[in-house]
């Protein structure tokens, strides 16, 4: 398994007086099986950072490496190796699945586009097994899936490419408490059993504490704090974690424990 390492990433949009510095000297690394949290207020630069880490946007300065190999944003097939290894899990999984494609077709799509070698049907079935879904869902359409099933299909779609790292953007925000816990358990298991790393972008402090050992706080395009998640949530001096602690209600299931 491989490590993702970003060093001193900088990104600016616009020119002259209209220029806006979005990221300044952002560095991070994610080891195999590690679940790293990323929190920050709206406009902090999380989306821009995610696009750079996915190889969709080049930084103005800094470097990105995966398993010691340089990653440079491009739409060419030369970056297929990286896009097979690093996959995105969207916030709204159901919306990310085409209503015209069965689950089988949805799983096959990234494998075809990224030229994933091997038996694709077997890989699709193995991915469904990894996320604990029966193969009977292969012939269903997204509108025939529950929210939890759709989220698991989105994760399976990423695993079909052989993903070693998942970049997940609020992946449990639309789920009810029971499904939310089940998906968080799934992420933990993928890390333990498959060595799958993860960057977890969220405003949900309870999910963050449940899932991530380490957390970064992004503010104004800079990492202003980083460390053990428990320390960040309890002892942070940064404004954003304090605001979240005040504004986010504790779920009943957590409050009753």
Image (cartoon, grey):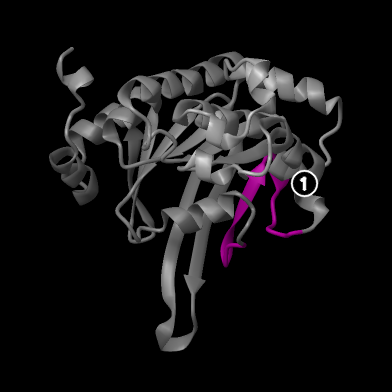
Q: Can residue 1 be seen in this view?
A: no
Left or right of residue 200, residue 166 in this image: right
Residue with the most extreme right position: 118
Residue found farthest to the bottom: 16
Name the residue: 28% across, 34% down.
205
Q: Is residue 112 shown left or right of residue 47?
A: right
**Residue at left offset 60%, top offset 61%:** 57
The answer to whether residue 63 is magenta is yes
- In this rendering, would 219 be left or right of 60? left
- Identify the magenta region: 58-75
- Residue 253 location (% of width, % of height): 22, 18
Depth check: give the residue in front, 193 or 150: 150
Where is residue 64 shown, x and y percent of the image? 62, 50
In the rendered image, which quarter is residue 21 located in? Answer: bottom left
Q: Is residue 89 left or right of 184 when viewed as pictured?
A: right
Q: How many labels does the image show?
A: 1
Relative height, residue 118 to residue 5 (above, below)? above
Report the residue at 59% width, 42% height from top: 97
Is residue 123 visible in the rendered image? The answer is yes
Q: Which is nearer the eye, 254 or 38?
A: 254
Crowd around label 1: few <14 · some 14–19 · many ≥20 (10 Å) = some
Q: Where is residue 110 in the image (x, y as percent from the top left)?
A: 73, 41
Residue wearing tag 1: 80
x and y percent of residue 171 in the render? Answer: 44, 36
User: Image quarter for residue 172?
Assistant: top left
Quadrant in the picture for the C terminus: top left
Image quadrant assignment for residue 111: top right
Q: Which of 165 and 228 is in front in this view?
A: 165
Q: Quadrant of the N terminus?
A: top right
Q: Residue at x 54, y 21 (%)?
A: 191
Asked if the magenta segment contains residue 22, the reply would be no
């Amino acid at each position: 398994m491989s490590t993702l390492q970003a060093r001193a990433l900088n990104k600016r949009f616009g020119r002259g007086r209209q220029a806006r510095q979005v990221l300044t000297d952002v560095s991070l690394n994610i080891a195999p099986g590690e679940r790293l949290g990323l929190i920050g207020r709206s406009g902090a630069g999380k989306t821009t950072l995610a696009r750079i880490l996915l190889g969709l946007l080049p930084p103005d300065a800094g470097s990105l490496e995966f398993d010691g190999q340089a990653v440079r944003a491009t739409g060419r097939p030369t970056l297929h190796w990286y896009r097979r290894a690093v996959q995105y899990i969207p916030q709204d999984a159901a919306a990310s699945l085409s209503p015209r494609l069965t689950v089988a077709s949805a799983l096959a799509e990234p494998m075809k586009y990224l030229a994933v070698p091997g038996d694709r049907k077997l890989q699709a079935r193995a991915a469904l097994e990894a996320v604990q879904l029966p193969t009977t869902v292969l012939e269903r359409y997204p509108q025939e899936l529950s929210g939890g099933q759709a989220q698991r299909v989105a994760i399976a779609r990423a695993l079909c490419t052989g993903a070693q790292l998942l970049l997940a953007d609020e992946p449990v925000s639309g789920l009810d408490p029971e499904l939310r816990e089940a998906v968080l358990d799934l992420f933990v298991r993928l890390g333990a059993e498959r060595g799958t790393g993860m960057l977890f972008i969220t405003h949900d402090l309870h999910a963050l504490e449940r899932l991530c050992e380490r957390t970064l706080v992004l503010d104004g395009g800079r990492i202003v704090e980083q460390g053990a998640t428990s320390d960040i949530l309890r002892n942070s001096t940064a404004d954003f974690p304090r605001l979240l602690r005040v504004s986010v209600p504790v779920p009943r299931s957590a409050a009753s424990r």
